[in-house]
């Protein structure tokens, strides 16, 4: 098990302790150090039309972005409170399969500055991208969001 | 019971039939013909910090906008499939109470054109605004979104 895979265990514990995340069946699947992959079953996230509920897509991408930053900060030994600040979501195609989301830094070059600012000022913001894929390729939904982290004292 | 209140009953039936909406405890509270009010308990929507999970706020505002258009179309005897097309959400303040969301048309003057286009072309888009309030006043979170409706044949 890689250091990245091992980092998923405390994330799973956190997910299980967050009632809405548990209720939507959100699972941490994989992390390669840059991209975090989550899944959630269609059955727990279906709308009146048999496709994935837009609110579930939004929730899953939001938790993916939040979890990505939380994980990456843990890997540096930084405990921080991470909050979503704003997000912009496009719903591109109906999804009739389980929800597979991934999240990554919108611009990886921003990471070092984010960490330095968080360490110096106790607070920093970063842009994250996320999407939920379609089984046939392409995206069902895409999110751009900004998150803010507050260092725990 | 006003015509508006009566319109909440089929909405409640729909909510109960949508697993993620039921799991988050979303309830249709009030409709005055222009604003739809929904609620969801904090306990079912709490994050790791004891405040409302951002994904739940996004989901609740999304379902509020979707339900507003669905309700208003029902009142005209129009059965349509309503989908969220895109949304922009700002998270303004942490919420440590039950989630109370409202949704309304971003510009009420667009309604007649939306209905005319839907009837003529079988498809139309409309902007909706929604927010989740704070108990002390103001907003915990605000959404601007576009929805698209497809007339059922």
Image (tube, coloured by chain):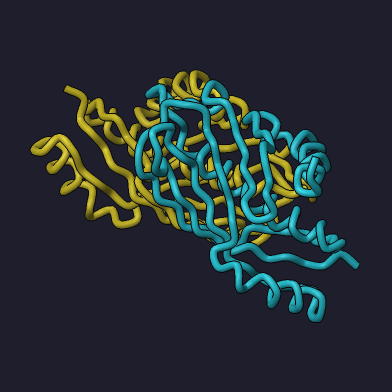
Chain colours: A yellow, B cyan
Q: Position of residue B124 (x, y in %)?
A: 70, 72
> Between B76 and B69, which is closer to the camera in this rendering?
B76
Could you tell me which quadrant the C terminus of chain B lies in? Answer: bottom right
> Between B145 and A42, which is closer to the camera in this rendering?
B145
| Residue depicted at 60% across the width and 34% down the height | B39
Q: In this rendering, does residue B45 appear at all? A: yes
Indicate whether B116 appears above or below B107: below
| Residue depicted at 40% across the width and 50% down the height | B90
Which residue is outermost to the right?
B153
Q: Place residue A31 in its image quadrant.
A: top left
Which residue is outermost to the front?
B1
Q: Position of residue A1 (x, y in %)?
A: 42, 25
How many numbered circles are shown? 0
| Residue depicted at 85% across the width and 60% down the height | B79
Which residue is outermost to the left?
A120
Could you tell me which quadrant the N terminus of chain B lies in? Answer: top right
| Residue depicted at 16% across the width and 48% down the height | A113
Indicate whether A20 appears above or below B110: above
Q: Position of residue A35 (x, y in %)?
A: 41, 45
């Amino acid at each position: 098990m890689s250091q990245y895979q091992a980092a998923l265990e405390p994330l799973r514990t956190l997910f299980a302790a967050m009632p809405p995340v548990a209720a939507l069946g959100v699972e941490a699947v994989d992390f390669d150090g840059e991209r975090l992959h989550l899944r959630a079953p269609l059955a727990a996230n279906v709308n009146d039309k048999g496709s994935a509920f837009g609110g579930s897509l939004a929730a899953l991408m939001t938790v993916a972005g939040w979890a990505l930053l939380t994980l990456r900060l843990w890997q540096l030994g930084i405990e921080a409170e991470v909050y979503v600040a704003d997000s912009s979501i496009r719903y591109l195609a109906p999804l009739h399969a389980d929800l597979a989301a991934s999240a990554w830094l919108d611009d990886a070059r921003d990471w070092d500055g984010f960490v330095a600012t968080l360490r110096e000022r106790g607070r920093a913001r970063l842009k994250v991208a996320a999407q939920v894929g379609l089984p046939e390729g392409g995206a069902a939904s895409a999110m751009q969001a900004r998150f803010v982290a507050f260092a725990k004292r």
